[in-house]
């Protein structure tokens, strides 16, 4: 059986991207932010949280 990776969809294209970030996103984002020494804005959308998670993963080496 061949498994084909699912391409990542740009957060701008998410139909739910403007909804508030999820609990798991918030939790992981705060963990990454603490490691990176940065503050996280309180009101992020799912799409904005995803982009910030990607950025902080790069900064912290978790990506």
Image (cartoon, rainbow, N blue to C red):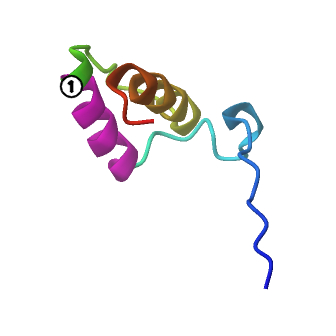
Main secondary structure along the magenta-highlighted residues: helix
User: Along the horizontal axis of the image, is 1 left or right of 50?
Assistant: right
Residue 44 drawn at (x, y percent): 44, 28
Question: For the point 75% across and 73% down, which residue is it?
Answer: 3
Q: Identify the image quadrant of the C terminus.
A: top left
Q: 43 or 62, which lies in front?
A: 62
| Percent of width and height locating residue 46 | 52, 39
Tell me: 57 left or right of 28.
right
- At a point 19% along the width and 25% down the height, the residue shown is 34
- Per the image, label 1 sits on a secondary structure element best described as helix
The percent coordinates of residue 5 (x first, y second) are 74, 60
Residue drawn at the location 75% of the way across and 58% of the way down? 6
Magenta-drawn stretch contains 20: no
Residue 51 found in image quarter = top right
Residues shaded magenta: 23-34
Asked whether, in this view, residue 32 is left or right of residue 3, the answer is left
Residue at the disc numbered 1: 35
Residue 31 figure quarter = top left
In this picture, residue 53 sits left or right of residue 27: right
């Amino acid at each position: 059986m061949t498994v084909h990776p699912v391409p990542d969809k740009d957060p701008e294209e998410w139909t739910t991207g403007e909804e508030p970030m999820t609990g798991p996103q918030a939790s992981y984002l705060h963990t990454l932010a603490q490691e990176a020494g940065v503050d996280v804005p309180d009101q992020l959308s799912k799409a904005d949280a995803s982009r910030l998670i990607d950025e902080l993963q790069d900064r912290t080496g978790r990506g």
